[in-house]
Image: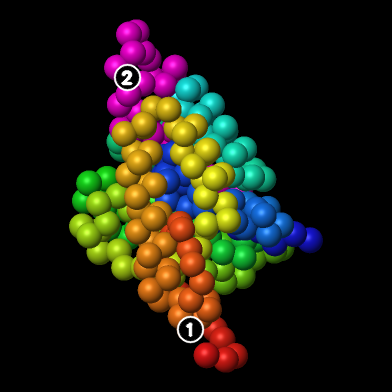
Amino acid sequence: MAKTALIISAHSADFVWRCGGAIALHANKGYDVTVVCLSYGGRGESAKLWKNEGMTLERVKTERQREAENAAKALGVANIRFFDLGDYPLEMTREAKDRLVDVMREVQPAFMMTHSKYDPYNTDHMYVSEWTLECRAIAQAWGHKPGEKILGAPQVYLFEPHQTEQMEWKPDTFLDISPVWDRKWAAIQCMEGQEHLWHYYKNVAENRANHFMRNSGGQSGGRKATHAEGFQSIFPRTVDEL
Ligand SMILES: [Zn+2]
């Protein structure tokens, strides 16, 4: 059975900027990566689309789904799901949480990724971080839908937010995504409604590559990296050797 990973994205483009490289890299390694987009970001993250004459929320959502599906294809995502919960505000009902718990149990991810814990610019993001941890705990509970296979203890990586320094986000993991940068760049360019972010996230990846190299002397042989992504992990690592 292939290893799996689960990405929980508040809006339909977040997974592209924040962990597109991790997705493409693990897809290359044979992982089946599932992406859950809780909303389309139709209201809050589609400014360019709203500038078109006669735009409606339904048209924006259709466009955002098309963009996200194209990006997912470019990254090698095995499965993308849209919960269509709405955004600004994104609100998660008990039913939506149970649906996410079901996905966690079905996918049985080796690791999960989601948003930073704090985001005063975008409260949708920080609520999703909290809900992911809540759903992870429920998915691990033997008493929730007894008889189903419970979730193990996958690491949760918080991906890099926008305006990093304001988010109380501190990376403890740098992932070299140089071999798949072309795929991430192609996916980024699928997000036509947010063209103003393309080069910003190219710069982030280049800067994180510098941090990767600065820190990789021991663990990664000090090899050169052109692009990287940073993550903050929630849970301790269990190891046999340091
Ligand atoms: Zn977002």
Quadrant where the image shows the N terminus: bottom right
Residue at label 1? 218
In the rendered structure, the answer to whether residue 159 lies left or right of residue 182 reads: left
Nearer-the-camera pick, 53 or 150: 53
- N-term mark: 1 or 2: 2
On screen, 157 above or below 93? below
Q: Quadrant of residue 51?
A: top left
Q: What span is colored magenta in the figure? A: 34-60
Say what amino acid the circle numbered 2 marks.
Trp
Residue at label 2? 50
Residue 143 seen in the current view:
no
Mark 1 or mark 2: which is in front? 1
Report the residue at 53% width, 79% height from top. 221
- Which residue appears farthest toward the top when viewing the image? 54
State yes or no: residue 141 in magenta: no
Q: Quadrant of residue 170?
A: bottom left
Task: Return the x and y of residue 47 as percentages of the image width and height.
Answer: 30, 26
Task: Return the x and y of residue 149 as percentages of the image width and height.
Answer: 69, 63
Question: Mark 2 CB in 8 Å range of ligand 1?
Answer: no
